[in-house]
Amino acid sequence: MSFSSDVRLAARFASRELRGGLSGFRILLACLALGVAAIAGVGTVRSAIEAGLSEEGAALLGGDAEVSFTYRFATEEERGWLAETAAQVSEIADFRSMAVVGDDRALTQVKAVDDLYPLVGSVELASGGTLSAALACDPDMPCVVAEALLTDRLGLSVGDDLTLGAKAYKLGGILEREPDSATQGFGLGPRLIVRRADLEGAGLLEPGTLFESHYRMILPETAPLDTVKAAAEDRFADSGLRWRDARNGAPGVARFVDRLGAFLVLVGLSGLAVGGVGVSAAVRAYLARKTGVIATLRTLGATRRVIFLTYFLQIGALAVVGILLGLVLGTLVPLGFAPLIADQLPVPARFGLFPGTLAEAAFYGLMTALIFTLWPLARTEEIRAATLFRDALGAGRALPRWPFLAVIAGLLAVLVGAAAVFSGTWELTLWTAGGIAFALFLLTLAGLGLKWIARRGQRVARGRAALRWALSAVGGPRSEALPVVLSLGLGLSVLAAVGQIDGNLRGAITRELPDRAPSFFFVDIQRDQIDGFLDRVEHDPAVSRVDHAPMLRGIITQINGRPANEVAGDHWVLRGDRGVTYAGTQPKGTKITDGIWWGEGYDGPPQISLAAEEAGEMGIQLGDEMTVNILGRDITGTVTSFREVDFSTAGMGFIMAMNETALSGAPHSFIATVYAEEPAEAAILRDVGRAFPNVTAIRVRDAIDQVALLLGGIASATSWGAGATLLTGFLVLIGAALSGERERVWEAAVLKTLGATRGRILTSLALRSALMGAGAGLVALAAGIAGSWAVVHFVMEGDFAVIWPSAIGIVLGGLIANLAAGLAFAWRPLAARPARVLRAQD
């Protein structure tokens, strides 16, 4: 018979089988639907954010395009080109400073604007009105607007006075929203907006001050962005100019959303893997009930191919239904909660239908269904006419024939490859795939081990009937231990790993880091102020350590005469400007790992000492030349040494250091770190602020709180992904409980006949579920701790400690989940009448 004839015959058989309803396939549909919905939901939110960033690019950026400079304003030549090119140009300066009210002071992120700001969008104030009116609230005094967080910290109301630098201002309004907030990146202080012209005399934008200037442009319709960008980069190639346009108005946000979305999709794949276990169990249970039908077909001459295609088409049709349900659910839930989600996001989101995202989720679901159904389906070939009334799927070879194994391996490779392409992170995808595979392998071993322990434990349980029955059921040939450990274990493993990693990071940031980190960073200390500053802090008995260094910022533009990105790729050191310092003698505590420091009095060509770890990552060797743009001037130096730089202590660390004569002539300020006892911090802050009002103090504990808040949001999002995996695992538990209900009814009937009470039988069923749930929780905890230790130790290079509250919660969660699923299906066995059950069995 030809293949097409076999397909037609199999399709006819499959359609007749499906007329019997969805009995036995509800769990299959639920597992696939939930896994696909999780991936589709995450993808929909990510696509909505990307669409919002794309559509609102000009508003987010504040114009059609922007050019930026570090620690300087545009030159006359650059301003002339901007005026010739753009229809409108708005100048903005962005820097940190201290807002002072009496003895209270708070760090703020200042935006100094001109009368054209904002070119696109509008600033929203709590009291209504316009920004220009708020900044002109008093004809005799300059005004500012500030976020409520800043005004609350300082106890300010509209109309109150505050000091910024060496100048007094009046609060003209409470800032609620600035249209370009998403482009500003991570800020340590709340926002304050002031006219740049009103900063004259404040001493905040002196030469060497740490600030950035931005020039927002509205371009004529006849000026394509690509053309203008190319002209700007060509004309000012050596000026340190940075370009950004409305096509990617908030690149940092877009990159973060893309990476987090890709990670959550990979977490969603863990949920699909758990769902795949449920799919496989459901298919196996269904085929076990069809043994007689399959054997009968074989006696009537049906070939192996016809039987395989019959159930392949039947289960394939149901899988498609499950995937479609998942796509609908994964689309409707984000759309239904779109207003709530949009309100919680710091960037615009445009929700809608995204065919590419849905196709990706459908592909994942389809591949999962194929991989996890082929294994049990392949074993239908072993059912022969001679096994008409036997459980053919419970005997025979453990593995399918090699052609099926080869197809399954090929499908796995396609799935992993596609996930890597979709996520854009090969390394993360491979680690995730390897972790899932290894976890499933370990969980399988653990499930088999749990059965072995239960069989051995029966000897210890003599005299305890309920416990002995429970152990016998866990260790028996029809035990549910393996599907329980697999389904619960993977979800709990992900949740355990997330909890341990988050707990260790929070511990390092909130407990360990403050013990090693300085109390303050002081920036913008001018050359004529550094001696007075050091005199104040170094003679304070509460100060244990003070470090200071000259501070400049530079952009690495070339390595060995080639564009830096071509040599070192998209390394983080090349993304924007980096700290640069200079020194004559080798600073105390500096550890040279390779090469030679230039020494005091060196007056030759520029030399560079580079952070060793980052140099290795970028492939830079001793003798290489690097070009660094500092304040619009290119400085080319030779790498003559590598240094050990530890950024984990939040102390002072520079990627690059140069010899003194290379940089000392450039306008610059000093940076200092002060390590002090906490009770003395307020006095230090007050005295330095009074003596040097232009100096900005960054309290490290406040920065730590901001980082901890950000990490909490990431951990929360990841936990939701792990929660979807856990919910899928709970559905698999329900499926396992349903599939074993017939055996439990038979078991209860036999025990009742032998005189067992309902209470003892219920106790036995509860113990069985609790033992398997606790076993799954313990295995998941071990896997989660091992995985999180590897991440913290090797990836984050930190110290690891088990977070016991989270660990105990994981074990209890596994126990309670399986106990709830087991007890939910205990009532029918308890209510069954022995005589009826035993007669039906005969």
Image: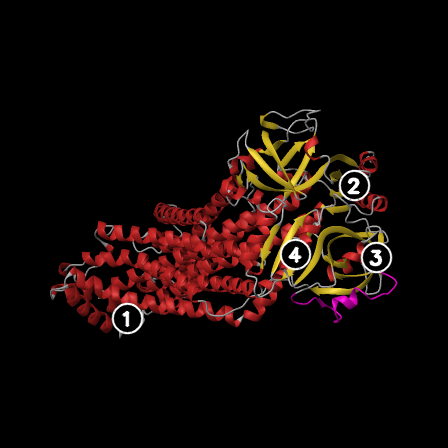
Magenta part of the chain: 120-141
Q: Which mark is residue 836?
A: 1
Rendered position, 590 above or below 166: above
Residue at numbered disc 4: 82
Nearest to N terminus: mark 1 or mark 2: 2
Q: How far apart in space, not on screen, are marks 1 and 3 (Cα)? A: 87 Å
Q: Does the stretch in magenta take in 125? A: yes
Look at the picture and state if 190 lies above or below 600.
below
Q: Main secondary structure of the magenta part?
A: loop
Residue 408 appears left or right of 48: left
Say which amino acid is labelled 1.
Answer: Arg
Residue highlighted by disc 2: 526
Dot 2: element: loop
Q: Earlier in the sequence, mark 4 or mark 1?
A: 4
Task: Name the amino acid, label 4.
Answer: Leu
> Which one is nearer the viewer's eye here, 590 or 655?
655
In the displayed structure image, the side of residue 633 where residue 736 appears, left or right: left
**Quarter of image, res 555:** top right
564 to the left or right of 176: left
Tag 1: Cα neighbours inside 10 Å, few (<14), some, or many (≥20)? few
- Determine which residue is flagged by label 3: 162
- The three-letter code of the residue at mark 2 reads Gln
Q: Residues within 10 Å of mark 4 (few under 14, many from 20)?
A: many
